[in-house]
Image (cartoon, grey):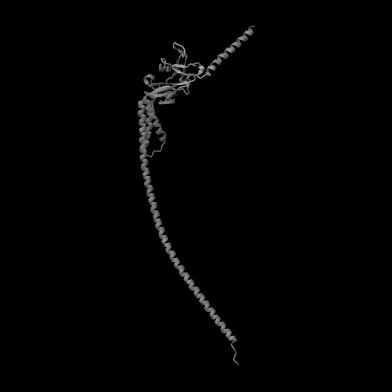
Amino acid sequence: MQVACMHAFVILLGVLLVTLISMPMIRSAQAYPLNTFTWVPPWYYIGYKSAPYYDDIVAYENGSTVELLVPVWNDPAWGYTNGLNVSKVVLNFWGIGVNKTLDYYASPHMIASNQYELFTISFTADLTEFGVSTWDHEYRIVVEHVNATAEPKKRVSPDFMIYWYSVSPGYKFVVVSSSLVDADDSLSKYYSYYNQYHGYSWQNFDAQQKATRAEIEKGIGDTYYSRGDYASTWTQYNRANTLWEEAIEAEGERRAINDELDLNRTRAQIQRDLTYAEATLTTAEAALIEAEAALITANATKIQAEAALMNAWGFYFIGIGFAIGWSCIGIGVIIYALRKPKLPT
């Protein structure tokens, strides 16, 4: 009997545990009315920031307008089929007791079933309200709502909430001073110069000295930055940037002079090469004239040789003619002598 009761108790306990586990799972399957939000530019900075925060932050400059967009969805699964009557949308910084509220309680804003509505919380970033620039604040967004069908009007629980860390990467809220913004902008400019010209082979000694001084002034500015003296930080960073600009200008002037000297040397070399080429051309022309004269002489000599050769051939043929003629005469005399009749004895 005791064993049977124990078995029944175990089964009942198992069913109860399954029910308790399954209820959150059923609720989590529903789309929560409030599951995201967006910080609207122009923020001064958004993302991971090291000192003094070492965290993901969204920062607005003191005096600028802050806007936060909050979409709310009336999911039918939550049962507000007759409309979700939004009475308040509150941005709550609980650590400093600051609330920024859209108050619709006098005339609730109804969201129809299965519809989205976008709410904009807007306020001015104020350092007197949010503390010094090194403070980052945690927050939550709360959407309050009232009944839709019954009177008297009353607030319905639970409120819908979403915390700063719920939307990755989870930005904490910061208000920064204008002097910090100016200092960071000047630092960004410094790194533009530094990344381009650090390790540069300066030709101008004065330019090299100014570049070295720029790095020293920046280091002093870093010291002021770590102390939170952003006005002095900006002064130092700005001085460093001025030194970079003077160094670049001096280097440009030195390079221009060197370029002019190089150009003059190149022009002189070209002139020397041209003079040499002209002299060479004159020599070549004289040689050509001499060669042409020699060719003319050679042609005349050739003509004389050809004439002499012709004369020689003429005398040769004349000689041959005489030889043949005298030979013929001699042969005729011999024939005549052989055939001449003999005189009687």
Question: Of residues 185 and 67, which is closer to you in this image?
Answer: 67
Left or right side of 285 for 75: right
Can you see residue 54?
no
Question: Of residues 193 and 342, which is closer to you in this image?
Answer: 342
Question: Of residues 338 and 234, which is closer to you in this image?
Answer: 338
Q: What is the x, y in percent for residue 330?
A: 55, 82
Residue located at (39% from left, 52% from top): 274
Q: Residue furthest bottom?
A: 345
Q: What is the x, y in percent for residue 110?
A: 45, 17
Query: Residue 338 appears in which quarter of the rendering?
Result: bottom right
User: Where 181 sits versus 294, above or below?
Assistant: above
> How many dots with numbers?
0
Can you see residue 296?
yes
Query: Residue 300 appears in which quarter of the rendering?
Result: bottom left
Residue located at (48% from left, 70% from top): 306
Residue located at (54% from left, 81% from top): 326
Q: What is the x, y in percent for residue 220?
A: 37, 28
Q: Residue furthest top?
A: 1
Location of the N terminus by quadrant is top right
Question: Of residues 121 and 133, which is closer to you in this image?
Answer: 121
Q: What is the x, y in percent for residue 187?
A: 39, 29
Query: Residue 53 appears in which quarter of the rendering?
Result: top left
Location of the C terminus by quadrant is bottom right
